[in-house]
Image: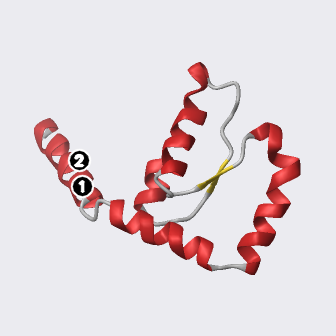
Amino acid sequence: MLAELTNANVPFISVPLPTSADNHQLKNAIFYERKKFCLLIQEKDLKEKLIYLIREIYKDNSILEKIKKNQRQYSDKNVYNNIDQILKKIIDEKN
C-alpha cells in the first residue's frame, strides 16, 4: 500500500503495526520516510505525536507539498499502463 500511495503522489502518515511479521511494516515505513515520501509515527507514540504532527501540517502546508514533490520524482508514470498490459496478456492467454 505504501508504494501505491507514493506512486499516486498521496502524502501519508505511516503507522506501522508493531506486531507485523519480522516488523516488516516498520522497516517499509522507515524506507519511505528516509526517502521523504511520507511521515512516520510508531503506534506507541501515536497519542503523543499525531495531534502535534497534524497541527504542524495545518500550519505549514509546504510539508505536504515537499512530500508530493519527492513522490513525483520517484513515481513510475507508466505503472498503471504496465499493469493493464500484463492483465490483457493474461486474459489473451486464457482465451
Three-letter residue code for mark 1: Asp
Q: Furthest residue to the top? A: 22
Q: Position of residue 64 (x, y in %)?
A: 59, 72
The one of 6 and 62 positioned closer to us in this rendering: 62
Q: Position of residue 60 (x, y in %)?
A: 69, 79
Three-letter residue code for mark 2: Leu
| 85 relative to 55 in the view: left or right | left
- The part of the image, by quadrant, that contains residue 74 is bottom left
Q: Which mark is residue 63?
A: none
| 80 relative to 69 in the view: left or right | left
- The part of the image, by quadrant, that contains residue 11 is bottom right
User: Where is 91 relative to 52, above or below?
Assistant: above
Could you tell me which secondary element the residue under label 1 belongs to? Answer: helix
The crowding category of the residue bearing disc 2, from other C-alpha atoms within 10 Å (few below 14, some 14 to 19, many at least 20), is few
- The residue drawn where x is 51% and y is 38% is 28
Report how far apart the C-alphas of labels 2 and 1 lie in the structure. 5 Å
Q: Furthest residue to the front? A: 34
| 76 relative to 1 in the view: left or right | left
Q: Position of residue 48 (x, y in %)?
A: 88, 50
- The residue drawn where x is 28% and y is 65% is 77
Could you tell me which secondary element the residue under label 2 belongs to? Answer: helix
- The residue drawn where x is 70% and y is 24% is 19
| 32 relative to 86 in the view: left or right | right
User: Where is 19 relative to 88, above or below?
Assistant: above
The crowding category of the residue bearing disc 1, from other C-alpha atoms within 10 Å (few below 14, some 14 to 19, many at least 20), is few
Q: Position of residue 12 (x, y in %)?
A: 60, 59
Residue identified by numbered label 1: 84
- The residue drawn where x is 84% and y is 61% is 51
- Evaluate if marks 2 and 1 touch, with contact meaning CB atoms under 8 Å apart: yes
> So how many labels did they put on this image?
2
Where does the C terminus fall, quadrant-wise? top left
Residue identified by numbered label 2: 87
